[in-house]
Amino acid sequence: MSAFLPETDSEDELPPGWEERATLDGKVYYANHVSKSTQWSHPRTGKKKKVSGELPHGWERKISDDGNVFYVDHLNHKTTYTDPRLAFAVEENESPTDIRQRFDASTSALQILHGRDLGGKVAIVTGANCGIGFETARSLAYHGCEVYFACRSKDKAKAAIEQICKERPNSNLHFLPLDLSSLQSVSEFCKKFEVEKKLIHMLILNAGVFGLPHSLTEDGFEETFQVNHLGHFYLVKLLTPILIQSSPCRIVLLSSESHRFSFLTKENISEAYLSPKTPDKFYSIMAYNDSKLCNILFSNELNRRLSSKGVFSNAVHPGNVVSSYLSRNWWFYRILFALIRPFTKSLQQAAATSIYCATAHELGGVGGMYFNNCYQCKPSQTSASEDLSKMLWELSETMINRS
């Protein structure tokens, strides 16, 4: 019986001695090397699978002189008799309401995209020059996606793009300046993107700040609130016509489990609470928690408003105590993150949930959810409030229109 216990949290993990294969017409079957038998259903889930669609980016299907089918990976100069599309086989009659866990906390973004061809797809990633955003953009680029780096620093973005292009020379990457602490910068970004005449298949709202002392932006808003929420809200508002035109389109907002520690409610939501003008009673960690709750509330309301038009939004938690650049703004957090770094997720693992929500076949047409470790989980009760989501939306509209 112990042989059938999974080694990871993934329900898709095969028991020892089993192998997944595919027929030439795309039907997936399972070979049990212990009993020397085969079956069509997965030995754990009991579900049947199939492979379909084009071969992954850089792959070619060939037939040998003796009639055997084999596959050539031109990017890595390898050949195999295994159909690479097995990596993203889909279950027959998959339902959006029955999402199984195929990945877990140890999965990397590149593992999720293994075998995928994102050629012809366009993604915008905010904060793509470092940390989780960089690994997100890098993973997409490795699989043929055209990626726009929406970042403040031109030099850092260019260096990040050069690094990826050095690793994968044919990458299609662009830089467009975006400073979320400036609504004018957000507006200019959208105008420049419109000139590109491109669709947006994935909009990954990754950029964020943490541990900032109280300060006001040029627009007069508290900086953590504007960068983590209001700037992204304005970005989506301006890009909405393109997002609808791009249908089906996916939006991913990076939130955090810290949203559970926010004290934002329907009774106290206001500009004075979310964006205080003075440092009196301001606590940076609480401002961060509130902004992360705003991310989920915004994602839910966005999905309610745009899902009927083919634009779907989900919020994600990248992982518990990720070793990233988020702690750069205060020496105490830098020391804390350094001490616990051996116990944290890697940046590739932290990017996995964003990549999963942006690309997974089973999430097509799915929105208004919260994901952690590449699996849907239940957020706080407050974040599920439709009334609070609508109140935040209306407040955000008012603040932008006034500035």
Image (spheres, rainbow, N blue to C red):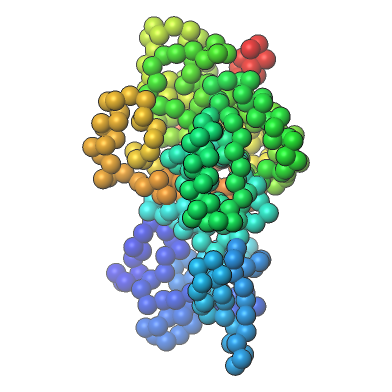
Residue found 55% across the figure and 26% down from its top? 179
Frontmost residue, 252 versus 34: 252
| Location of residue 84 in the rendering, given as x and y in whole percent from the top left corner | 55, 70
Q: Nearer the viewer, residue 353 or 149?
A: 149
Q: Is residue 54 above or below residue 95?
A: below
In x, y percent, where is residue 49? 57, 69
| Residue 325, placed above or below residue 280 | below
Q: Which is more toward the observer, 86 or 342? A: 342
- Please, is residue 146 above or below residue 20 in the view? above
Where residue 163 appears, x then y in whole percent?
A: 48, 48
92 versus 100 height, above or below: below
Q: Report the residue at 38% width, 38% height from top.
A: 324
* Residue 90 visible within the image: no
Residue 264 left/right relative to 189: left
Q: Residue furthest left?
A: 339
Residue drawn at the location 40% of the way across and 83% of the way down: 33
- Residue 403 position, x and y percent, is 63, 12
Whether residue 62 is visible to the viewer of this picture, yes or no, is yes
Residue drawn at 43 percent across, 20 percent down: 287
Task: Give the total number of marks visible in the rendering.
Answer: 0
**Quarter of the image that includes the N terminus:** bottom left
229 relative to 330 in the view: left or right: right
Among the 4 quarters of the image, the one containing residue 19: bottom left
